[in-house]
Image (cartoon, grey):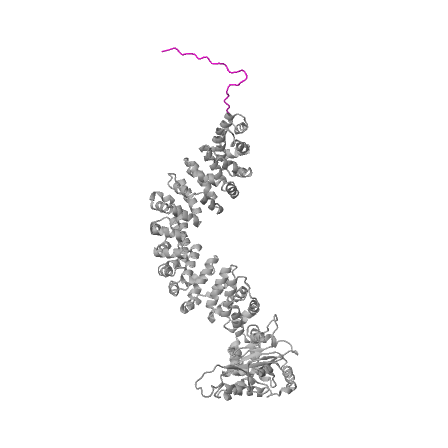
Amino acid sequence: MGKKVKKEVEPPPKDVFDPLLVESKTAATVVLMLSSPEEEILAKACDALYKFASKGGENKVTLLGLGAVEHLLKLISHEDPIVRRNAIMVLGIMASNHDVKKLLRELDVTNSLISQLAPEEDVVIHEFASLCLAHMAVEYTTKVQIFEQGGLEPLVRLLGSPDPDVKKNSLECIYLLVQDFQSHAVVRALNVIPPLLELLKSEYPVIQLLALKTLEEISKDRETRIILGENKGLDCLLKILETNEFSDLHVEALAVLGNCLEDAHTLQLIHQIGGLKKLLSFVGDSTVPDIQKNAAKAITRAAYDSENRKILREEEVEKCLVNLLEIDNDGVKVAASEAISAMCENSASKRALGVQGIPQLAQLLSSDNEEVKEAAVTALANLTAASPSNARAVAEAEVIEPLVNILNAQRDRAVAHAATVLTNLATQEPFRTNIQGHGIMRGLAEPLRSTNSHVQSKAAFAVAAFGCDADARTELRNAGGLGPLVELLHSKNKEVRRNACLAVMVCASDELTTVELCRLGALDILEEINLSIVRKNNYSEAALEKLLDNNLSQKYSRMGYLSSSNIITDGFYDCGQIKPGVKFLSLKELSMQELTDQRAIIFINAKPQEDLAVEEKAQDPFHELTIVSPSISRKGSRERARKGKGKKEEEKMKEIVQVISKVQIEINLEHSHWPPPPDFILLDYINDASRTILPLTTTREQVVALAQFVADKMGGPIERDKLHDFSWELHISEIEFELKSNVVPIGKVKKGTFYHRALLFKVIADRIGIRCSLVRGEYNRAWNEVELVDDSPQGIAGLLLPPKKYIVDLMFEPGFLIKQRSAEADQYKHI
């Protein structure tokens, strides 16, 4: 063994300390050490703080409170690489805390962090700088800062880093940034697709997952989808789906492919490489609800394009969708129903889905899940549109009751589409009758009150579809549906207003409904709409005309014209031209006014006496009791008189009859329509005209004879220059005074001027089948127009000439026919 050699060591200079090992067990002391000028102390202090912060969230909060963040920010730019590295490590680990992130945003550190991503920096600095940015990028303001300060370029570059943590952090930050649409074009320009596809081959699932999520976001752009196809990205995605060990990535891979299916060019590429068939097969074999749901959503997006629908139809996508309807998962059922709705735009698919899918969709209408019901009824709405065969299949699936029930659902889209399905079924008479039996109009009353314009529009259109039936109109009236329907005429939405006008036009097919619509203000609103070039529509004018056609008194008062198809019936009255904005009063209201010197109201009521008796009896709720009781009373009194009790019992019965009669009168006044008094003179006129004029062989002869008949009843012919001596006003005033009323039956008028005679002519002509119109002029003028065919010229046998319009003279030369467009006609109208 040799001896150890003792080495001589020179003593240190007297003014230099030996190296000190500084130890501390308190975080505050270590934070203070961050102010040291010694690089070794700074490095060790940062290392100690990293270990301390890594132990939990409370430690991060402690360091934040001690002001560590401000010190560390200064150190990430330190000239010593170890100090710089250790400082960024502490910031990276602390940035997961919400309050730390908030402080970092306030201190505007993104630019400093981005500078740490430079290629020459240590890989550890890359790791923790990208980690810090990833933590901060969850906030929108930080995303904007990173984007504006050029952070995407170094992050994309770091996707090629040899360190998996750097890849993961950079990828996570990119994923957060591309959730804002403005970043898509930038990452595309930075050629991000190749490195993302390369990361799909990573051995780390978290990196693969983040790469797929990033691809899902950026593949929402068509340009990115094209680049993805050019880089064989579609093959890569399909391989992931075909690989069982990548089952945890299938949902995300399918989401990317779903975006790709939206583009016709990309879908064609997938189709050409057999990917679409593989995709549908994969979905059919899968038992994972998320995969099935995402596949259906992908098909939905693709089906918005007509070319895509053709490709999907070639691969018989309908079978796949119908099978998905039977999956026991509500999310899958919803997605499949939405895909069916989209595919219905293809007529061949609509036929196929109608045969295969309607029974399953019908069952979904009874689901407890409101979203499932909504999606199913939407699909049925699209399936039955312009498809009688599908409508028949839906009706046969016994879905009418659940559809009517959905009209009162809470989801607006479901309500609107339920109304649409029922409307589509109503095009076939048997189904419409069946639906009406389920109370469709009662069900529509509430949707008409909706604040959603789509619901309002579809509900109004459904009312139009079913309003052609009298019982349906009565049901809507009784359900209070006419009020909200009239309110929809005010809508600022063009479609709602148009459909409301259509519904009013259809519902105005009977007098009771028309009267109620007018009472609710429909007439005034429609007049206002028709005065507006913007608000007027195809149905507003027709609705106004239809309302007036079933309320001829008001039509004549407002329009001054009744056509030959406007048949005057009992209850009609002429109260003169009404001014705009003035309320049109009923005949009952007019009859209750005090006698005035205003123009008399001429009314028509030629009902036979026996008809009036039957009506009065029908209107009397106690008619049996009030008719029978007196006879019982008399019979009973005779019997009781013999027993010495008749007088008392008879008086008691009389009191009962009086009470009943009083109640009857009150009820009639409150609930019954006011019946105008009968005009037996007018009835005689009609009977006489029927007996004497109808047998005449030609219409011309009948017109002339009726004109002479009317003139004879109204004071005879008047000489033109003595018209001012024809004191018809005094005669009418005498009748009003006699009746103590402004309302005068036309039969009472024996001295009538133009408008009395024209009205009487029209009334009798309508009863005996002569077609004529009634036109109001100015200064108490009115006249009738008839259309007559002249005889064919001599020598031209069998020639059918068009009819010509004539004005019938009822005043000066009764029966003389004046050509409508002639000087004589103008003279008759205006002189």
Residue 16 on the magenta segment:
yes
| Among the 4 quarters of the image, the one containing residue 515 | bottom right
The main secondary structure of the magenta stretch is loop
Residue 148's place in the image compared with 637, above or below, is above
Q: In which quarter of the image is the C terminus?
A: bottom right
Residue 479's place in the image compared with 16, above or below, is below
Query: In the image, which residues are magenta?
Result: 1-23
Residue 755, how many percent across, how many down? Answer: 59, 81
Residue 706's place in the image compared with 396, above or below, is below
Residue placed most toward the observer, 496 or 829: 829
Residue 223 visible: yes
Residue 318 on the magenta segment:
no
Q: In this view, does 52 lie to the left or right of 351?
A: right
Residue placed most toward the observer, 460 or 372: 460
Residue 254's place in the image compared with 769, above or below, is above
Residue 676, how many percent across, how many down? Answer: 57, 79
Residue 748, how many percent across, how many down? Answer: 59, 84
Task: Give the residue drawn at x 39%, y 10%.
Answer: 3
